[in-house]
């Protein structure tokens, strides 16, 4: 819900600086999925 609120605020203020750059958001999600995989498999996974 916080992401939606941040997006709406950025649109309302017409201020794209309030949003995370797309490439950084994708990388953050990729690392999160890798971390979850490592947790589930109880092992280190390569990034």
Image (spheres, rainbow, N blue to C red):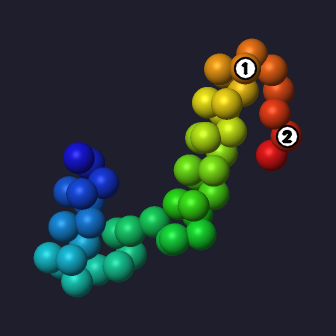
Corner quadrant of residue 35: top right
Mark sitting earlier along the chain (1/2): 1
Left or right of 20 on screen, residue 23: right
* Numbered label tally: 2
Q: Which residue is mark 1?
A: 41
Left or right of 30 on screen, residue 6: left
User: Could you tell me which residue is drawn at 21 percent across and 77 percent down?
Assistant: 11
Corner quadrant of residue 38: top right
Q: How far across and how far down the image is residue 9, in percent?
A: 19, 67
Q: How far across and how far down the image is residue 3, in percent?
A: 30, 54
Circle 2 — which element? loop
> In the current view of this chain or complex, which residue is farthest to the left?
12
Near mark 2 (Cα within 10 A), the count class, few <14, some 14-19 or many ≥20, is: few
Mark sitting on residue 30 = none
Left or right of 35 on screen, residue 45: right
> In the current view of this chain or complex, which residue is farthest to the front?
41
Circle 1 or circle 2, nearest the eye: 1
User: Could you tell me which residue is drawn at 57 percent across and 61 percent down?
Assistant: 26
In the image shown, does 32 or 11 lie closer to the viewer?
32
Q: How far across and how far down the image is residue 2, in percent?
A: 26, 48
User: Could you tell me which residue is drawn at 59 percent across and 52 percent down?
Assistant: 28
- The alpha-carbon separation of the residues under discs 1 and 2 comes to 13 Å
User: Could you tell me which residue is drawn at 67 percent across and 30 percent down?
Assistant: 37
Circle 1 — which element? helix
* Circles 1 and 2 in contact, beta carbons < 8 Å: no
Q: Is residue 13 above or below residue 6?
A: below
Left or right of 11 on screen, residue 26: right
Q: Which residue is mark 2?
A: 46
> In the current view of this chain or complex, which residue is farthest to the bottom?
14
Q: How far across and how far down the image is residue 15, in percent?
A: 29, 80
């Amino acid at each position: 819900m916080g992401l939606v609120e941040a997006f709406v605020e950025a649109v309302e203020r017409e201020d794209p600086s309030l949003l995370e750059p797309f490439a950084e958001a994708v990388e953050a999600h990729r690392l999160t999925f890798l971390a979850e995989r490592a947790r589930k498999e109880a092992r280190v996974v390569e990034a």
